[in-house]
């Protein structure tokens, strides 16, 4: 049927059908985009968790160094443990800082979906004229 010969009811029916399809597609895009953003945030949170675990290990080694110092007063055992604790502490700080920086820079909003919704609204306005 020619577009010029369709009734107003048919045109509104087509518009309603197209808008319904468009909304379903936009919702699917938003869901996909939010899942992707959440996965990225989860990986960055895992970096913070890994940094915290390494920091805890550094604390345990530091405690062991103090115990070794008090128990033996020998330089070799506690000094070695102290060096290990310092190295692990530096690693922990680096992991935590990297994760925090990545989380701070992350944009969790579905920006592509928002942009396409704006475009769709403009298109609907143009078609309604």
Image (spheres, helix red, strand yellow):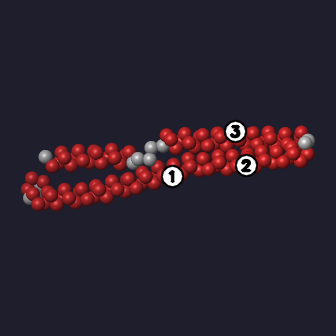
Query: What residue is rendered at 23% in x and 57% in y?
Result: 18
Q: Secondary structure at mark 3?
A: helix
Mark found first going from the N terminus, 3 or 1: 1
Callout 2 crowding tier (Cα within 10 Å): few <14, some 14–19, many ≥20: some
Identify the residue under disc 2. Answer: 57
Spot occupied by residue 115 in the image (x, y as percentages of width and height): 33, 44
**Image quarter for residue 95?**
top right
Q: Position of residue 81 (x, y in %)?
A: 82, 43
- The residue pinned by badge 3 equals 90
Q: Which mark is residue 108?
A: none
* Mark sitting earlier along the chain (2/3): 2
Q: Quadrant of the N terminus?
A: bottom left
* Label 2 to label 3: alpha-carbon separation: 12 Å
Mark 1 crowdedness (10 Å alpha carbons): few <14, some 14-19, many ≥20: few
Residue 89 located left or right of residue 37:
right
Q: Which of the two residues, 65 or 19, is positioned nearer the viewer here?
A: 65
């Amino acid at each position: 049927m020619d577009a010029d010969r369709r009734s107003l009811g048919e045109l509104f029916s087509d518009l309603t059908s197209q808008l319904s399809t468009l909304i379903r597609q936009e919702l699917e895009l938003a869901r996909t985009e939010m899942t992707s953003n959440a996965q990225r945030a989860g990986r960055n949170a895992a970096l913070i968790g890994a940094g915290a675990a390494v920091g805890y290990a550094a604390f345990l080694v530091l405690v062991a160094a103090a115990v070794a110092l008090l128990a033996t007063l020998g330089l070799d055992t506690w000094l070695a443990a102290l060096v290990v604790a310092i190295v692990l502490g530096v690693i922990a700080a680096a992991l935590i800082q990297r994760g925090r920086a990545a989380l701070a820079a992350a944009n969790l909003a579905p920006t592509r979906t928002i942009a396409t919704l704006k475009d769709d609204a403009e298109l609907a306005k143009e078609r309604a004229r």
